[in-house]
Image (spheres, helix red, strand yellow):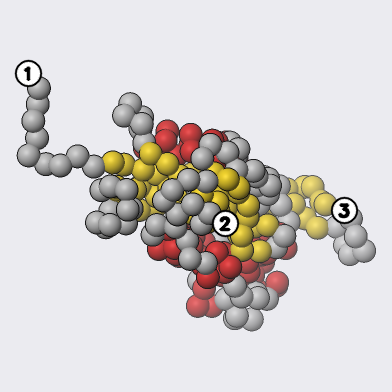
Amino acid sequence: MAYTSQYPPFFVTVDLVILTISDGAFSVLLVERGGEPFRGRWALPGGFVQIDEDLADAAYRELEEETGVGGDAVHLEQLATFGAPGRDPRDRIVSTAYLAVGAHLPQVQGGSDAADARWWTVEKALSEQLAFDHREILETGVERTRSKLEYTDLALRFVPPRFTMPELQAVYEAVWGAELDPRNFARKVVRTQDFVRETEEERRGGRGRPAKLYVAGGAVSLWPPMSREQQGER
């Protein structure tokens, strides 16, 4: 016996806010749409969830299909759900957005139904007329990232496993859009319990002194937090 519902069907998609630091700039991956609607417009990577697919699996699949970036290269977390009527001209479509963060993510080429794909500075991307409601989704992902840098270890997702203090500081400066005092920043990082751990290794190169290398200290939540309000404090 066929089941008849009083509720109309709707579709589910996933969208990806993929962020990295590229050439010193806080950057997001956008794809050029190869089909309608919004052919030729730039958008966040994403697509429809298959009937037998979990949301996170769909996000990883779209990440690989549209950008060639493997799931092991990023930290992936669910961001928010967007379901305003009319957000997609094709039908009633609800999207679950995911935030993906990685270090030194590669240059990419469009795949699947994407005509092209490339990294944009976040500032430039937010000034574009993106497809669907993707500007709103991007704004949400950017603010989530800026906020989580204050109280979690998310900044470490933007650097390689072994990193220098200037490399970590560059993440905060790029994401927050502000210059930080190096000595004050280093002092705050070191005093934050289990945030980073100094290794016995150094990175040599250039004219300056060798730079100490650090690794993640294991903390997930940071205390005291790295407050944006105190970023200029010396």
Percent coordinates x, y for residue 5 in the rendering: 9, 35
> Which of the two labelled residues, at mark 2 and mark 1, occupies the earlier sequence position?
1
Q: Nearer the viewer, residue 76 or 232?
A: 76
Residue 28's disc number: 2
Where 36 falls versus 56 (above or below)?
A: below
> Which of the two labelled residues, at mark 2 and mark 3, occupies the earlier sequence position?
2
What's the amino acid at mark 2?
Answer: Val
Which residue is located at x 44 percent, y 63 percent? Answer: 135
What's the amino acid at mark 3?
Answer: Arg
Instruction: Measure how far apart labels 2 and 3 are at the Cα level.
Output: 31 Å
Where 2 falls versus 160 (above or below)?
A: above
Where 49 falls versus 35 (above or below)?
A: above
Percent coordinates x, y for residue 64 in the rendering: 55, 36
> Which of the two labelled residues, at mark 1 and mark 3, occupies the earlier sequence position?
1
What's the amino acid at mark 1?
Answer: Met
Percent coordinates x, y for residue 158 in the rendering: 61, 53
Q: Mark 2 vs mark 1: give the one in front.
A: 1
- In which quadrant will I find the N terminus? top left
Q: Are marks 2 and 1 in contact (CB under 8 Å)?
A: no
Which residue is located at x 81 percent, y 58 percent? Answer: 211
Instruction: Measure how far apart labels 1 and 3 are at the Cα level.
Output: 72 Å
The residue carrying mark 1 is 1
Residue 199's disc number: none
The residue carrying mark 3 is 204
Instruction: Measure how far apart labels 2 and 1 are at the Cα level.
Output: 49 Å
Q: Are marks 1 and 3 in contact (CB under 8 Å)?
A: no
Q: Is residue 52 left or right of residue 40?
A: left
Which residue is located at x 59 percent, y 81 percent? Answer: 233
SS of the residue under disc 1: loop
